[in-house]
């Protein structure tokens, strides 16, 4: 009984003291090819601000201001800032729960361990997609988009749940 009460209190205190996501970042090897161009380089994504705002439907929700720095080989770096719904990027706890569900619910995907520059990471290879989701900021360990017009590949090389 004491253990159960302790766990409930711990969970409640963790939930109430939810930490800011500012500073979460991930760096990816990036490759893109189209019929007329190709680029390789590094993409660094970082959460730089969290703000409660109205969605297009008028509902109040948290948005993340995300910096995306693209440093292509042989070209000038660029940086763009985007406000994205917080729900688009799961928190560390939610990602671990997603991986657990993936392990037991086959229709979600298959558990695979990927070896990347960031280390060996347990992922969920999402069914019918070229996406490998892991417990890392911005969710993706590996993502491949390959359609008629464009090929894009992002592979995680470094990440942190804290500021650099």
Image (cartoon, helix red, strand yellow):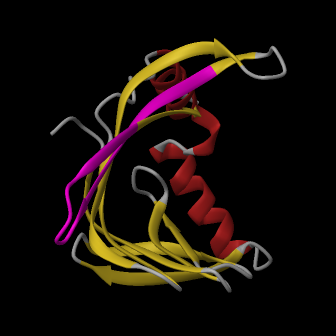
Please determine whether, in this image, residue 57 is positioned above or below residue 42: above
Question: What residue do we see at 46% from left, 25% from top?
Answer: 14
Q: Main secondary structure of the magenta part?
A: strand
Does residue 61 appear in this view? Answer: yes
Residue 86 sits in quarter: top right
Q: Residue furthest right?
A: 57
Front residue (pair 48, 40): 40
Residue extent of the magenta highlight: 62-80
In which quadrant will I find the C terminus? top left
Q: Position of residue 46 (x, y in %)?
A: 33, 41
**Magenta stretch: residue 71 in it?**
yes
How many callouts does the rendering have?
0
Question: What residue do we see at 40% from left, 56% from top?
Answer: 136
Please determine whether, in this image, residue 77 is positioned above or below residue 84: below
**Magenta stretch: residue 96 in it?**
no
Does residue 13 appear in this view? Answer: no
131 lies left or right of 117: right
Q: Position of residue 128 (x, y in %)?
A: 74, 82
In which quadrant will I find the N terminus? top right
Please determine whether, in this image, residue 26 is positioned above or below residue 161: below
Q: Position of residue 50 (x, y in %)?
A: 46, 21
Residue 101 sits in quarter: bottom right
Front residue (pair 139, 43): 43
Q: Residue furthest front?
A: 36
156 lies left or right of 122: left
Please determine whether, in this image, residue 24 is positioned above or below residue 6: below
Q: Position of residue 143 (x, y in %)?
A: 51, 73
Residue 145 sits in quarter: bottom right
């Amino acid at each position: 009984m004491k253990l159960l009460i302790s766990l409930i209190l711990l969970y409640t205190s963790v939930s109430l003291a939810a930490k800011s996501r500012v500073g979460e970042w991930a760096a990816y090897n990036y490759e893109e090819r189209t019929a007329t161009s190709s680029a390789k380089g590094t993409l660094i994504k970082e959460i730089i601000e969290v703000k409660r705002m109205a969605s297009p439907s008028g509902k109040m929700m948290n948005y993340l201001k995300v910096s995306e720095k693209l440093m292509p080989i042989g070209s000038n770096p660029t940086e763009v800032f985007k406000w994205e719904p917080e729900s688009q990027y799961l928190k560390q706890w939610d990602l671990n729960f997603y991986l657990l569900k993936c392990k037991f619910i086959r229709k979600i995907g298959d558990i695979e361990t990927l070896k990347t520059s960031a280390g060996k990471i347990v992922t969920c290879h999402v069914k019918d997609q070229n996406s490998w989701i892991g417990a890392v900021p911005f969710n993706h360990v590996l993502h491949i988009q390959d359609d008629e017009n464009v090929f894009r590949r992002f592979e995680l090389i470094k990440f942190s749940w804290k500021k650099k």
